[in-house]
Image (cartoon, grey):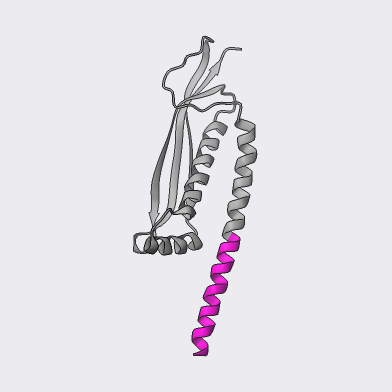
Amino acid sequence: MSDLVFEAAVTVVLLAAGYLIGRRVELLHYRSIAEREGTWLPVPAVTARTLHDPRPVVESRLVVGSVVVSVDFYKRFLMGIRTLIGGESVSYATLIDRARREALLRMKESCPGADLFLNCRLETASVFKGARGTTGSVEVIAYGTAVRFET
């Protein structure tokens, strides 16, 4: 019986440590994203396909930003429970939110002189399947056309 109690205690401690460490990493990433988004806020990324601006275009080019984010054990554990009882998968929603925002930032950072990002699109994919078909990593790719106007 003592072995069972010990194993249960170890499991609880590992789950708690995974939650605390994973949450800390996630919060640090969100902080980094928020700071970088503040820098890029004046430069719009729009889904429009055509440009409605009278200024002459000096340069336009395809830009891409991608990120692969791994699902941690704690999120996978919570998702397993959520699968049993149903409802919104909040733990995966934050994962997708971080990946989407990071991919858009990387796209913008790939062309620092752009005045506008036109025809922006996002694609998502499950990159790695874990044990029993669970999602291991998610890739988000942001792409569009960087436009620079004549000054």
Q: Residue furthest bottom?
A: 1
Residue 51 among those drawn in magenta: no
Q: Is residue 135 above or below residue 142?
A: below
Residue 8 among those drawn in magenta: yes
Q: Quadrant of the C terminus?
A: top right
Residue ID at (46%, 36%): 142
Judge by depth and name the residue closer to the eye, 56 or 54: 54
Q: Is residue 138 above or below residue 131?
A: above
Residue 121 in percent (x, y) is at 43, 32
Judge by depth and name the residue closer to the eye, 110 or 79: 79
Residue ID at (44%, 54%): 89
Residue 40: quadrant of the picture? top right
* Secondary structure predominantly adopted by residues drawn in magenta: helix
Judge by depth and name the residue closer to the eye, 126 or 64: 126
Residue 1 in percent (x, y) is at 49, 90
Residue 12 in percent (x, y) is at 54, 73
Q: Which residues are magenta?
A: 1-21
Residue ID at (47%, 49%): 93
